[in-house]
Structures are given as C-alpha cells and as structure tokens.
C-alpha cells in the first residue's frame, strides 16, 4: 500500500509540473523586445569640449535607464577605443597607460561585446595583450588574426593561465518575461588600415560572408558589429541582405544608411552621441523591426557615480601631469564655431584648419619673426574634430607627445626637398602642414614668393621632424641645416602645446 501511494504521489507531482510547463509555454507569444546601445570610436573617458559633450559616466546612466525599461539591453563598442588618447600617453608607475584606463571604465560598465578597430593595433603586441587580458567583456572579429612564426591564430585573452580565444562570431541567448527565448548572433570585421607586423588582416568581405554562413543556422537572427568605411559596410550589406542591422564605426560622424532592408548606423566619436536601437523580433515570421534613436550625450545627463569615480581617478592623474605645463587645464581658451579637423584621414593628406592653427602657433611662439612653420601630420593624434568650447586639455589631446618648436636656418634647396617629400607622403604621418608655404602649379612659394633654392630661410619645425624619423635626410647632421635654435624651458616655444594654447587665447 505504501508503495502504491508513493507511485501515486510521484504521478501527481509530475502531472502538476507538466501542467505548469504547458501553462508557461502557452504564455509565450513568440515575440521578444530587446535594446542595443551602440558606441564607436571612443578615446576619451571624460566629457570633452569644456565638459559639454561625451563622458562614459553619462553613457552608463543612459544604459542603466534603458535596463530599467528592458532587462535585455546590450552594450556594444564598434571598435577604436584603446588609442589614441591623451591619458594613454602618460606614464604611471613607469609604464605607459596605453588604454588601461578605457578597459577599467568599460569593465565597470559591463560591455556585452566589442569589435576590434584599426587603432587597437597602434599598441604594441605586448600592450594589446595586456588590455585583452584585463578586459572582462568578450571581443569578436572574423578577419584579424595574430601572426606567429609559422602561421596566424585567433587573438586570445589569458586569464588565470588559461587562454580564451577571440572568436570569429558571437552568440547570445536572451529571454523575456513570458518565456520567449531567442539566440542572436554577431559577425565582425575590421578595416585593414593599420598594417603592423603582428597582425594579419584577412579579406573583410570573404570573412564577413563565411562567418555569417557559419552562424546563421545556429541563431534566430544575425547582426553586424563592424569597424570599416561606410562604403565597405554598404558592400557587406549587399552581400548579406538578411542582416537587419550593422552597427559600425570608423567615420567619427553619425550616419544612418539603408541598403535594401539592411540598416547601417554609426554614432559620433568620443560618445558625443550614441545610438539606441529598440528591436522587436517575431519568431513565427522571422521579422525584425528596429526603432533607432541617435541620442546626444551632453551635460544634461547625470554621471553614474561608480563610473565617475574611475574617470575622476584618471583625470586627476592627467591634470597633475598637464599642470606641469599649463596652470589651468580646464580653462576655456577658444570657441570653435567651425570644427577644427584633426581626423586621421584629412590630417595626413590635406591642409586642414587645425594644421593651420598649429603652424600659426609655432610662428607665434617666435613672434612671427621667421619665414615659415612646418609640422608633420603624424604629430596630431586626436583623430577627431574640435567644436565649441576648447580647453588646454583638448590641445593636449591634439598633441599628446608635446615637444619643442625649433627654429632653424635652412638652405632653400633642402627646404624644397623636404616639402616635396611631405607632399609625396600623403596618407602617412610624414605629410606636412605648413604656414606661409603654398604649392602653386607644382611650384613652392614662401610668403607668396617663389622658393629660391639658394636662399637661406628661417623656419620653425617641430623637434620630432629634425630627428629624421619621418624624413630621413632632415636632421641636424645635414650640412644644409645651417643652424638650430632650441628654446629654453621658460620660453613659449619649449612646448608646442603651450604655444597653441597661448595663440588661441589671443584670437
């Protein structure tokens, strides 16, 4: 009798559990809502432009508010975050920061997925590996591989002596309150614009297609998280028309494009804006509906206290360093109505207004008592535009490595060789920005007069250029460099950043 009662009891429990499961399943409507919060090309953890825009602590407030609306809110970075940054150039305990501050902030924000951008490979292999190991969030890329002596392998994190590969694809399962459950997949590729000896770039279009093919049957829907030019994103969209959304980076200015049914969204650099994508997916129809909002991150948004503590720690380190050169790093010294363009592509290929400001400042540092001024584009590291209120911190972001402005007397023949070399170096850091120098119908003019090969000119150069790294024949050992004046530490020309700050104050 006891045996029979035990069996009956088991059957009753099983029956109740089954009924409960059926009831739960019947509540599932097959539709699920989720939110993507997208950032791209973020180099600065603190607000910029006099505190008006950006700031990762403000982004965290936005994220937490979105989580209150929908627990299925995911945070993404579409590449470029470890470099360039002013803080990254500092030394702490004898070691360059090199993006460590960004990883610390992003860990606190619980990023769900990040893609490689080309600027991640500005770091040495050793420094990049440290940042990978420190990160508590997943990375993804289909086309960047780590070169070894014999082959190429997946990048990896090393945690507690265990290697965790950075995979070509990423899958995440989400579930809503009524029990609807789906798997979402992600593919990612990076533009091969920063060739370094430890990275192998595979064809981005081949890898986008193959990684999509590898994942599409394992998930309900696939999204893109890329760091390529918009023309490349559009081509990927044509190759993969079933992808509803590509979250991209690289251009630094916001855009929202459609190729067929594929949406391609990019936010502004340095978290001046973020994209909020509110997405609905229907399991029965396989239809994805996206409602996207470009949200400005500005001073009206309160900073999250937890993230702000980390940001403030690094900002205090930065301000202590800057105060060795400038007394008041947060002072508003200039208002830019038109963006001062320091983005990598133009700054290394054409004369920009920011290049003009820097070279005019170099002449200003010597009382404009010279014939011309020259700086190499590679010294300008901000890869962004300056708009609105500008502070000394912004100028340090533009020229993080500083250095003196030297005044040299140079033979016209050598000056022409230097200028010709810089013009042929378009697209590289050796491209030259010039003050009182123009190129007219393939002829160089100095102060509106044809360059005289036999004349001796007085020209201000960034001291880096005289080291022969960018232009091999330009150094203090060249006999046509007739004299070099190196400023003392109490002179304005001693630090190019100080010269730019003082010049802008006078405008």
Image (tube, grey):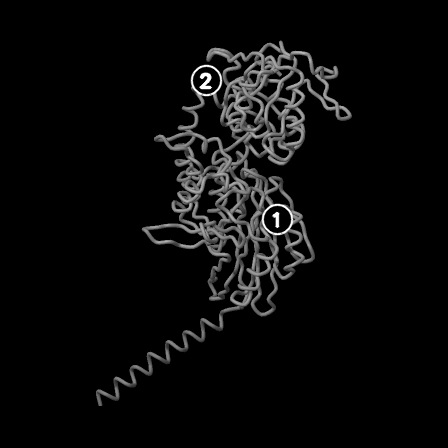
Q: What residue appears at the point 43 percent right and 42 percent down from the top-left corner?
A: 103
Q: How many marks?
A: 2
494 to the left or right of 249: left
Residue 420, given in percent of the width and then of the height, sits at 67, 26
List the residue tagged with mark 2.
327
Q: Nearer the viewer, residue 55 or 486?
A: 486
Query: Distance from label 1 to label 2 (Cα)?
Result: 41 Å
Q: Nearer the viewer, residue 248 or 435?
A: 435
Residue 21, given in percent of the width and then of the height, sits at 42, 74
Residue 362, given in percent of the width and then of the height, sits at 59, 17
Within 10 angstroms of label 2, few (less than 14), some, or many (20 or more) residues?
few
Within 10 angstroms of label 1, few (less than 14), some, or many (20 or more) residues?
many
Q: What residue appears at the point 49 percent right and 49 percent down from the top-left corner?
A: 114
Q: Secondary structure at mark 2?
A: loop
Q: Nearer the viewer, residue 44 or 304?
A: 44
Vertical placement of 359 versus 197: above or below? above
Q: Secondary structure at mark 1?
A: strand
> Residue 265, which numbered label?
1
Q: Quadrant of residue 365?
A: top right
Q: Quadrant of residue 17?
A: bottom left
For this orientation, the residue located farthest to the bottom is 1
For this orientation, the residue located farthest to the front is 479
Q: What residue appears at the point 46 percent right and 37 percent down from the top-left corner?
A: 303
Vertical placement of 92 versus 280: above or below? above
Vertical placement of 39 versus 240: above or below? above
Residue contact at pointers 1 and 2, CB within 8 angstroms:
no
Q: Earlier in the sequence, mark 1 or mark 2?
A: 1
Q: Quadrant of residue 91?
A: top left
Q: Nearer the viewer, residue 194 or 136?
A: 194
For this orientation, the residue located farthest to the left is 2
157 to the left or right of 259: left
């Amino acid at each position: 009798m006891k045996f029979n009662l035990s069996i009956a009891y088991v059957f009753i429990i099983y029956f109740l559990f089954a009924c409960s499961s059926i009831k739960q399943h019947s509540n599932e409507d097959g539709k699920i809502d989720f939110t993507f919060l997208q950032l791209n090309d973020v180099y600065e953890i603190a607000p910029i432009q006099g505190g008006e825009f950006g700031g990762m602590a403000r982004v965290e407030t936005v994220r937490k508010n979105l989580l209150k609306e929908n627990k299925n809110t995911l945070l993404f970075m579409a590449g470029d975050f470890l470099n360039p940054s002013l803080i990254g150039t500092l030394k702490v305990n004898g070691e360059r920061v090199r993006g460590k501050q960004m990883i610390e902030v992003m860990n606190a924000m619980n990023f769900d997925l990040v893609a490689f951008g080309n600027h991640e490979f500005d770091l040495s292999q050793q420094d990049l590996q440290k940042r990978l190991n420190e990160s508590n969030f997943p990375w993804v890329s289909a086309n960047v591989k780590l070169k070894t002596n014999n082959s190429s392998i997946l990048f990896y994190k090393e945690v507690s002596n265990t290697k965790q590969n950075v995979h070509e694809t990423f899958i995440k399962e989400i579930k809503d309150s009524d029990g609807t459950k789906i798997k979402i997949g992600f593919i990612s590729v990076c533009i091969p614009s920063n060739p370094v000896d430890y990275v192998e770039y595979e064809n981005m279009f081949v890898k986008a297609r193959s990684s999509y093919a590898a994942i599409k049957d394992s998930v309900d829907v696939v999204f893109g998280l890329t760091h390529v030019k918009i023309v490349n994103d559009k081509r990927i969209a044509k190759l993969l028309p079933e992808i509803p959304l590509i979250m991209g980076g690289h251009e630094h200015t916001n855009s929202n494009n459609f190729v067929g049914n594929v949406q391609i969204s990019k936010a502004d650099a340095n978290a001046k804006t973020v994209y909020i994508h509110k997405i609905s997916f229907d399991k029965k129809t396989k239809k994805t509906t996206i409602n996207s909002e470009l949200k400005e991150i500005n001073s009206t948004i309160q900073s999250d206290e937890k993230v702000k503590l980390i940001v403030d720690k690094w900002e205090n380190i930065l301000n202590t360093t800057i105060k060795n050169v400038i007394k008041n790093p947060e002072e508003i010294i200039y208002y830019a109505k038109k963006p001062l363009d320091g983005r990598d592509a133009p700054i290394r290929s054409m004369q920009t207004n920011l290049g003009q400001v820097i070279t005019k400042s170099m002449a200003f540092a010597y009382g404009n008592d010279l014939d011309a001024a020259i700086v190499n584009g590679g010294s300008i590291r901000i890869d962004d535009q300056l708009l609105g209120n500008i502070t000394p911190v912004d100028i340090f972001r533009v020229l993080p490595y500083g250095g003196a402005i030297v005044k040299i007397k140079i033979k016209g023949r050598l000056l022409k060789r230097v200028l010709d070399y810089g013009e042929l170096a378009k697209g590289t850091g050796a491209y030259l920005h010039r003050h009182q120098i123009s190129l007219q119908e393939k002829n160089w003019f100095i102060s509106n007069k044809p360059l005289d090969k036999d004349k001796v000119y007085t020209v201000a150069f960034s001291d880096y250029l005289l080291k022969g790294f960018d232009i091999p024949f330009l150094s203090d050992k060249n006999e046509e460099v007739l004299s070099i004046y190196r400023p003392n530490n109490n002179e304005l020309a001693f630090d190019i950043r100080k010269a730019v700050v003082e010049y802008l104050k006078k405008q």
